[in-house]
Image (spheres, grey):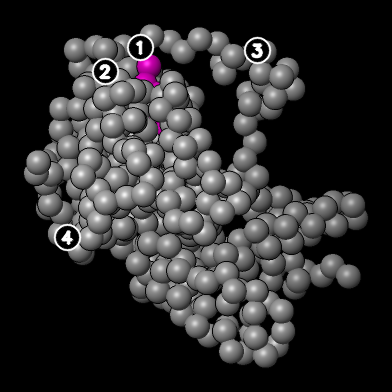
Amino acid sequence: MLSYRFTLLVLLGLLLSVAAERVPGGQLALAPLLALTVPLWLALTALVALGWALRRRRIALLPLAALLLAWPQVQRGLPLHWAGLRQLASGYTSGPLAQPVPRRSLRLLSANVRIFNVYAHLRKADPSAPAKAIAWLAASPADVLCLQEFYQEPAGTRTSDGDLFRVADKLGAASGRQAFISKSLTNSAGAQFGLAIFSRLPIVGRGEIAFGRLSQNHAMWVDVVGPGPHDTVRIFNAHLQSMSMDENDLVAAGSSKAGLRSKGRGLLGRFARGAAARAWQADTLVARLTHSPYPVLLAGDCNDLPYSYSYNRLAGPSRMPGLLWASDRAIPTTAACRRCCASTSSLPARSGGCWPAACTPKSRMPTIFRSRPYTS
């Protein structure tokens, strides 16, 4: 039975869980876990609103108002893009995706390539997967490729795969793109791991952002020049801290009480440490983004859910006016630039006033934590 007390309890739960998205995991370890319950409280709020509405009680307006206020959270879990739905219904025979890309545009592709399944156990199911992935990226019409968990074997690498993993050559000069490889590790055989950006537009500036020390979890950026005289864009490519949870531990924790007792505490600890690391990594990244002298595109692997501090920090329009976010783990988001830019896949050039002043702060970029410039 519905009651006023239960309704208030649900609304309080929704309020606290949404507020938890604003709290870094390093300040309150419980905050990331509480933020994960946002979908539960949204569903309960909707059910409460429906229940009171069926009874024709005015109190139904209260949970309805709460849902409206929490609409950004609703869209994070259930994004509704009417233009995309119309194109889907038409079989993509009409609408923006069916039209030729405007000449003055920038097309960006972001992907976590998982080291191209270089290890035998990763490509056991499909030995041709690495070649297919590399060929697909090379043939992509995207002007800019932002790749995370990148792997390549440059000339001179001791390998039994021949030139299969000469990725920088295949996605770079052979595909008409300039390359910037941000290496976090070079193994004893000479193979390289890290992040990469490939661009068909001229790269006029580049750099790396280390989160403490340069590791797999870091960021890189390039300045590219578009077709117009004032069309310089700064593109960031980032890989944030992962959950670091073993799949077998998750299965064990969910299969029995004994498994939960033996694995649960360790999993919670890893989750808390990962959330805290991502929080300050996101803060570091935002500090660099907001002081860019050019309009910004952000691509990368956030390694987090939409209901999290790092996602809210990076994608929240109030924190980053005009930021466009492209990621395989985040919903593409636009803020102040939405009037001109439908998505990160096709970004009109700045000429003609596409990017408002909020996208182009003029203050100098400060030194944030241990950030080091690119050196060839």
Q: Is residue 106 magenta?
A: yes
N-term mark: 3 or 4: 3
Label 4 secondary element = loop
N-term mark: 3 or 2: 3
Residue 299 in percent (x, y) is at: 38, 40
Going 23% across and 60% down the picture, which residue do you hit? 188
Which portion, as a residue range, is magenta?
Answer: 105-109
Label 3 secondary element = loop
Circles 2 and 1, Cβ within 8 Å, touching? The answer is: yes
Mark 3–mark 4 Cα distance, whole angstroms, equals 48 Å
Where does label 2 land, which residue?
Answer: 226
Q: Residues within 10 Å of mark 3 (few under 14, many from 20)?
A: few
Q: Which mark is residue 225?
A: none
Where does label 4 land, which residue?
Answer: 369
Where does label 3 land, which residue?
Answer: 94
Going 71% across and 50% down the picture, which residue do you hit? 64
Q: Amino acid at mark 1?
A: Arg
Nearest to the observer: residue 58 or residue 259: 259
Q: Amino acid at mark 3?
A: Ser
Q: Is residue 125 magenta?
A: no
Q: Residues within 10 Å of mark 1 (few under 14, many from 20)?
A: some
N-term mark: 2 or 1: 1
Where does label 1 land, which residue?
Answer: 104
Q: Amino acid at mark 2?
A: Gly
Mark 1–mark 3 Cα distance, whole angstroms, equals 21 Å
